[in-house]
Image (cartoon, rainbow, N blue to C red):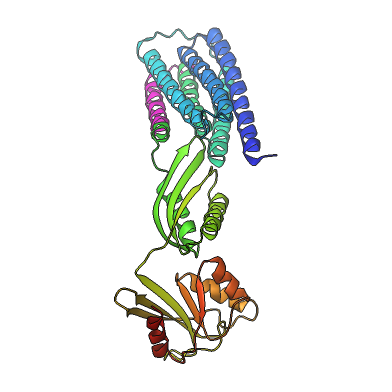
Amino acid sequence: MDVKKKDAGVLLRVALVSLLINGALVLIKLFLSSSTGSLSLRADAVHSFIDLFGSGALILGLFISRRKSSAFPYGLYKVENIVAIVISFLLFGTAYEIMHQAVFATSEIHGISGWTLAVTASLILVPFLFGRYEVRMGTRFNSPSLVADGKNFTADVLSSAVVFFGLLGQYLQFPVDRIAAVIVAVFIVIAGWEILVSGMRVLLDASIDLPTLETIRSIIIRDPAVVEVKSLMGRNSGRYVFVEADITVRTANLEKAHQVSQRIEREILKAVPNVEHPVIHYEPWHTTKIRYAVPLADYEGTVSGHFGEAPFFALVDIDILARSVERTEVVANPQQDMTKGKGIAVANFLLTFKPAVVATRENITGKGPGYVFAEAGLETIRTEAEDLGSFTRECLERL
């Protein structure tokens, strides 16, 4: 089964449970309200009734967001964000209803008993547990509408708690439900505002969060064939993330450049959840500088006859226009003492320094390091130089 279809099926089942729970809460609260005459229970029943419409909208949004259409090639994923915004306005409506009832309505409570308090207390536990579960599932599958519905349940917990303490106060001849209801209404407005802002950011194509963007950037630049990330953009659409990047690659071969872009796309899909169709645009590298890497037998600059066993490597930066050495750096080989796979490990180590050319005295073509460098788009050459000075002169003569 397709992973995305499986995830959508899970979300729909959670949304269906949300609908059933809200329906049950409406019936129970209406029954308690009619039997006790409680104003706060009646307002809470209205809250749950609005939530019932929200759960229906959630199911509709999840269903529509799964559909494919040639008129919407990027999918209908933003329907989920529209649903989240609808839910935020339902929260505002709920807050208004609670506040209006608390300030203006008259209350004629009668028949408050122990079992009424017990049932009302249980109405706090149910939305609390399910709301936390729904937010966790929405976060796991990156579904904004499910997270919004879970937060809506959290707001229902607060309003149910107000109802309980209001009834308890009435039972103890100490009514405080009106003041508490106003406080809860403020919390509901805050939760609704957060959901509204989050949904509007997506509809307006705001950038994805900075940590995710930096994770994607590090994946791209880590590829040995990538010289530069010229631009990187990402946006959310429903629970999915769309990524687009412009990169410079160290090859003029279009087939190899395409392979690099495909490799990067696979790495992004593995590392970042819910990425949909990452797009990597590539162009060849045009530079006035070139970096050579050459193995050294010692820190003084003697060129080593062995690649993997060389204790040091020199990185020589050549300015092509000035035909001069711009910078030379000697780095230690941390893989020198490896017993197996040394050549490939050393090659991967060198790739982190982004050389354009690797020079060796031994022939590494057809060997592990040679394959690593070829896949990364690096040029490998043979050198007869015995020391770093003669090697740099050899590099300049190649220009």
Q: Quadrant of residue 329?
A: bottom left
Image location (x, y in percent) of residue 300: 41, 91
Secondary structure mainly formed by the magenta segment: helix
Q: Is residue 318 magenta?
A: no
Quadrant location, the C terminus: bottom left
Q: Nearer the viewer, residue 40 or 251?
A: 251
Question: Quadrant location of residue 322?
Answer: bottom left
Q: Which residues are magenta?
A: 171-197
Q: Position of residue 126 (x, y in %)?
A: 58, 28
Compared to residue 276, the image places residue 22 above or below, namely above
Where 325 sits versus 87, above or below? below
Q: Position of residue 104 (x, y in %)?
A: 35, 10
Q: Is residue 322 left or right of residue 7?
A: left
Q: Position of residue 86 (x, y in %)?
A: 45, 23
Residue 350 visible in the shown view: yes
Q: Nearer the viewer, residue 264 or 142?
A: 264
